[in-house]
Image: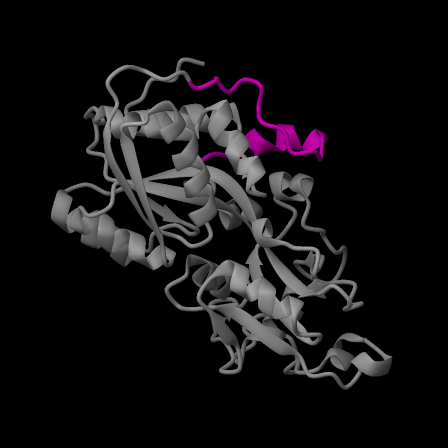
Amino acid sequence: MKRCRRIGCGVAVAAVAAMAANAQVKVDEALPMYKPVQGISGSIKSVGSDTLNNLMTLWAEGFKNMYPNVTVEIEGKGSSTAPPALIAGTATFGPMSREMKKQELDEFEAKYGYKPTALPTSIDMLAVYVNKDNPVKGLTMAQVDAIFSKTRKQGYPEDIVNWGQLGLEGEWKTLPISLYGRNAASGTYGYFKEHALGKGDYKDSVKEQPGSSAVVQGVASDKGGIGYSGIGYKTADVRAVPLASAEGKMIEATPENAYTGEYPLARFLYVYVNYKPDSQLDPLRREFIRYVFSKQGQQDVVKDGYFPITADIARETLKKVGITPDF
């Protein structure tokens, strides 16, 4: 179950493995169509992940189309901004591209007497991007670590600083590797540090970018560039490099490999909510959550380049916040 832990599964990866039979991304037919109810109005504020910024916007637009009297404000400056906003009560929802850390959970519990609830909304693959013209065929996770980290916790024998060290020839042989990444406020930064660098330290030469798209843009404009970002930010000017957990088969960043857990950097994307156990959510939050876990909400996931969760995961997640599934 090592891969299951890597994705952060509160529910077994087997629940999504059934969707892997067809590599095309399809929304689970068992998910319900969302139908609006009467009397929903008010304000929603989302504070947190930049990775989830576009997806939160799509959900907000779909929700507002059904409820014109609802206003939604979205602030996506990084996953680490979500816990303080939820603790202070200034955010309705806290999207995060990682699970909350123990200290964040403890600080929330110290104020409210219970922990926040994590809602796994979708599946992302963190891709390692190179320039579209770069011929590198694949990388082991130890090589990725030796490229980005100065501590090399994954055990690679030498620091990797140019493309020739990875077997490239000709003009690439002496070309220096140029590193692009996120800043410390980002959940993507923390996830990559933990899972790719073995909790090691980034090199000082990493060009830290304020957002996911900026990482991809940097790599696209830099022939020797390499960077990490969510698969939803892929463009025609970059290429996602196949990865291997160890020496052996390189795994491509495909939906099938995300669902089976074979791809080494697959993860859930979460929305955290302040839910008091055994209570009833207010109608506004309840209906927004129901929308996220509906057919329309999961179609938004696909539209943004991520992978939808199954009806089984949706049912279990809704129950966590006192919503009885009707499917």
Q: Vertical placement of 279 versus 259: above or below?
A: above
Region rendered in magenta: 10-34
In percent of width and height, residue 222 lies at 66, 74
Give yes or no for residue 30 being in the magenta stretch.
yes
Question: Toward which corner of the image does residue 131 lie, by quadrant?
Answer: bottom right
In percent of width and height, residue 78 lies at 38, 58
- Horizontal relation, residue 11 to residue 162: left or right: left
On the rendered image, what quadrant is the N terminus found in? top right
Res. 317 in view: no
Give yes or no for residue 117 being in the magenta stretch.
no
Residue at x 25% of width, y 41% of height: 92
Residue at x 70% of width, y 33% of height: 24
Q: Vertical placement of 116 versus 184: above or below?
A: above
Q: Nearer the viewer, residue 326 or 215?
A: 215
Q: Nearer the viewer, residue 122 or 17?
A: 122
On the rendered image, what quadrant is the C terminus found in? top left
Residue at x 56% of width, y 71% of height: 180
In percent of width and height, residue 166 lies at 76, 75
Residue at x 71% of width, y 35% of height: 23
Question: Toward which corner of the image does residue 289 lie, by quadrant?
Answer: top left
Res. 297 in view: yes
In percent of width and height, residue 317 lies at 39, 30
- Horizontal relation, residue 302 to residue 242: left or right: left
- Name the main secondary structure of what is drawn in magenta: loop
